[in-house]
Amino acid sequence: MWRSLASNMLTMLVVGLFLLGGVILWGKTQYTAEGPLETAICLRVERGSNMTKVSRDLESQGAVKSGAMFRLGAKYSEKTGQLKAGSFLVDARSSMEQIIEQVTTSGASSCGTEIVYRVGITRITTQVRELDPATNKFVERANFQLGTDETPAIYTNKLAEPDTRYRVALAEGVTSWQVVEALKAMEMLDGDPGTRPAEGMLAPDSYEVVSGSKRADILAEMQERQQLRINAAWEARTDDLPLENPEEMLILASIIEKETGVPTERRQVASVFTNRLNRGMRLQTDPTVIYGVTKGEGVLGRGLRQSELRKVTPWNTYVIEGLPPTPIANPGMASLEAAVNPDTTEYVFFVADGTGGHAFAETLEQHNRNVVKWRAIEAERSNN
């Protein structure tokens, strides 16, 4: 009898262990298998949250079949206590293992709200946008001019949310003064910006920042990027340029940047200034004169006066020889490259052509004809 009982118990134990092993194997398979989510979602994990809350949220959104299984997987992988706050993009069919990896590895949000500050030549445009998980594209929720327009409520509300992401985007051709003033206006940043960076030494680019970032640190990163670009452009320069050093390249690049917004024209504009420098001609470019008036602090907002075109300043290239003493803006990489690799032309003149671009000329006679055409276009526009 005892032998029979022991045999039965042993059999039951073996069966039980077998079943337990099967359950564990099944659970592991479920944990790593493709999930039920049909469309990507944005999972928000609040500060102070826990795996129970997260699992219930995932379950309610159809991202996991079993919240209990999700919690067991987190416990088994020893990640229960590693939960991060943030907004996480959970792709369709993500496994429980993949989701747990997302919410425990990094606190950097991958979806949710992003506030973008676009620092332009004339204004700071603030855009509040949210990532649509279904299309993986941003949807604009608000767009206004910082410091000018009425501040929308959604902007104020999103500033208070800890997982809101921020981006600062500098347009080509902004001045260092404009950048510093823009950073001062961004209330989620911290600290004094310090001494204004030298003109031309801030890289037009997009910078991801976080709430509480130091303004001085952001400016330092902008300068570091620009220095790398300056080094790369100068290293790749062509021969026989009328430029002695990277500083002169930066000055010329800033003039090119302010003279044209048409990408395909940059090297042509560069060729005009290169030809003028090689021939000992004055550059005669309005943006440098404007900089002599404003020093880069704001926008002139009107046409140049004859008295300003005649006034001697270090930046008035109608009266001085060669390049001005400093850049007049922060040029982008394309303008830096154009400055040291201009088109090969005989152009020494250019004027607006009414399309947003310019008409180029090799002789004064050709240039004068182009000027007549441009003035006719201006007159027609003023009459309409």
Image (cartoon, rainbow, N blue to C red):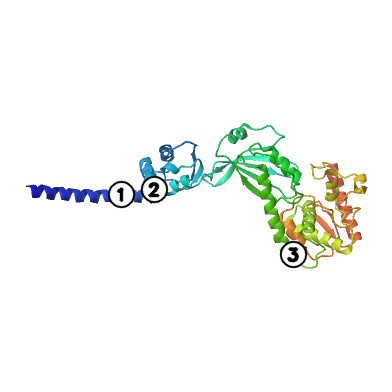
Residue placed under numbered mark 2 in the picture: 77
Residue placed under numbered mark 3 in the picture: 237
Task: Say what secondary structure mark 3 lies in.
Answer: loop
Residue placed under numbered mark 1 in the picture: 24
Task: Classify 10 Å Cα crowding around label 2: few (below 14), some (14-19), many (20 and above).
Answer: few
Is 257 positioned to the left or the right of 207 in the image?
Answer: right
- Under mark 3, the amino acid is Arg
- Under mark 1, the amino acid is Ile
Is 204 positioned to the left or the right of 274 in the image?
Answer: left
For the point 12% across and 48% down, the residue is: 6
Which residue is at the far left? 1
Answer yes or no: is residue 166 visible: yes
N-terminal of the pair, mark 2 or mark 3, is: 2
Q: Quadrant of the C terminus?
A: top right
Task: Classify 10 Å Cα crowding around label 3: few (below 14), some (14-19), many (20 and above).
Answer: some
N-terminal of the pair, mark 1 or mark 3, is: 1
Task: Say what secondary structure mark 2 lies in.
Answer: loop
